[in-house]
Image: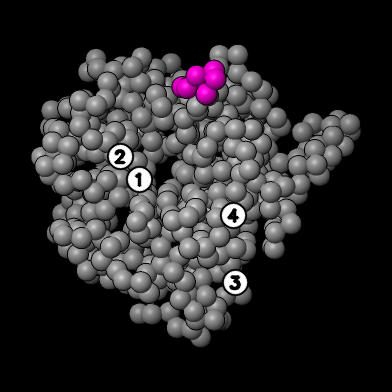
Amino acid sequence: MSLTRRDFARQSAITGAGVALVGSVGALATAPNALAATETETEAADSAEARHGHGHGGVGYGPLVTDPEGLLSLPAGFTYRVITHSGKTKLESGEFTPSNHDGTSTFSGPRGATLLVNNHELAGPRANWAYPVPLAEGLVYDPAAAGGCTVVEVRRDKVAEWVGIAGTATNCAGGNTPWGTWLTCEETEDKAGTNGFTKDHGYVFEVDPEDRRRNRNPKPVKALGRYAHEAVVVDPKRGRLYLTEDASGPNGLLYRWTPPQGFEHGHGQLRTLGDTDGSLQAFKCFDSGGRYVDDLSRATKIGTVYGVDWVDVPDRDARAVSVRKQFTDGQVTRARKLEGMWWGDGGIYIVSSYARTESPGQAHDGAVWFYDPKRRTLTLKVLIGVNPDPSVDGDFDGPDNITVSPYGGLVIAEDGEGVQHLFGATESGRTYPIARNELNIGSAEDPEYSEFTGVTFSPDGRTLYANIQVPGIMVAITGPWKRQKRG
């Protein structure tokens, strides 16, 4: 059923539930609808509260303290613990932890343990990688592929790691499910015969963090389509799945999968689906005047609201033509680098990492949208202006993985140029640093810092887990977390 122009006009005054955000502090303080204070204003407020003995009075946790170990700078009072490190820590089977950590989620484990499923974004042939995901017996989809997931069990005095799935390719992000599993997404369209692969790739697979038996004989959920998957979110009320695509030439799409009538979600149920079960659709946006929107980069103001219709995908397995190329101009809305997603506030936070010359609208260094499935509206919550000098520590750029914080607002993993951060964004729009990657994988003359990935809180909210993708390091961050002020 289409969302009529009259329905949208009635709803467009409502910007949806959730946090109202802006981009880098100071960078967008004068933009329409911006709510952020400038850095100067924030510092003045902090200094005033400090003089009166109230400690750090602004948003966040104060300036980052350089790590003498050269790995992770954090605010005063915070500490980190290395959980896994590719090429150093080992799996239960004796092989080294695979490299290139990416999307991650946490689950409550037995006897107070925390379980994490960790993607490993390894593309192409296994021979290209020093530490691919080991081909554990019974858990391999394609023996020629290097990627997959590991499951990490964290206790106070012990860490254990084992293979959840192997033989998949370019496992980028994904998403957790209300029934306690992880959906890992292949960000590739490689078919059998490419890179020596024996099977087609570009699918979603389900991984159970607790019951290893359910991971045997991996089967792709072909009903969700074959394309450069990034992330997936489950609507716990309606049972629909939403999926992002990170692709260009043309730009990627946001998808919605609606289960067939009578289908009930649960452990192992996605494996029972036929290849074309349910309906897979791509989004199409229009503004309050009913005008079609070709690309999300057209939005230039925080608070922009679009209505959303959904258009059927002709061939979800992309046998001859990539899914995003099956649509002509005017049929769908596109966006560059549709990345992480997270369910919260009754809807979905969706990242578009940046827009450049490949996008028809205004250039930006990151945006976060909120999709309200009840109203079928998409609202621009974050818009980060182009960072003038990413090599200088200050403004943020390139949001990627994202999570909703139990302390209010969002926590975002940065995948931009130059300096790389984990940063927060409050409900009133201020941004603040949480961590900075100090591990230089380049040279002193030409430094390079890997992106952060897999940002996610423990089930009890006390620990923030995140990854440094290269070489592949998972850290657990603890400290004096607090509810963030609106500002």
Give the numbered dot on residue 383: 4
Amino acid at circle 4: Leu
- Which quarter of the picture shows residue 163? top left
Q: Residue 300, can we see it?
A: yes
Position of residue 139 relative to residue 424, above or below, is above
> Within 10 Å of the Cα at label 1, are there few (<14), some (14-19), or many (20+) other Cα atoms?
many
- Residue 122 horizontal/vertical position (percent): 29, 33
Amino acid at circle 1: Gly
Q: Which residue is mark 2?
A: 171
- Residue 235 horizontal/vertical position (percent): 39, 59
**Residue contact at pointers 3 and 4, CB within 8 angstroms:** no
Mark 3 to mark 2: distance in Å?
A: 36 Å
Q: Main secondary structure of the magenta part?
A: loop
Q: Earlier in the sequence, mark 3 or mark 4?
A: 3
- Which quarter of the picture shows residue 197? top left
**Residue contact at pointers 1 and 2, CB within 8 angstroms:** yes
Q: Secondary structure at mark 2?
A: strand
Residue at 48%, 34% (x, y): give it: 452
Q: Which residues are magenta?
A: 439-446
Amino acid at circle 2: Asn
Q: Secondary structure at mark 1?
A: strand
Mark 3 to mark 4: distance in Å?
A: 19 Å
- Residue 317 horizontal/vertical position (percent): 18, 58
Mark 3 to mark 1: distance in Å?
A: 29 Å
Q: Which residue is mark 3?
A: 14
Q: Nearer the viewer, mark 4 or mark 2?
A: 4
Q: Nearer the viewer, mark 1 or mark 4?
A: 4
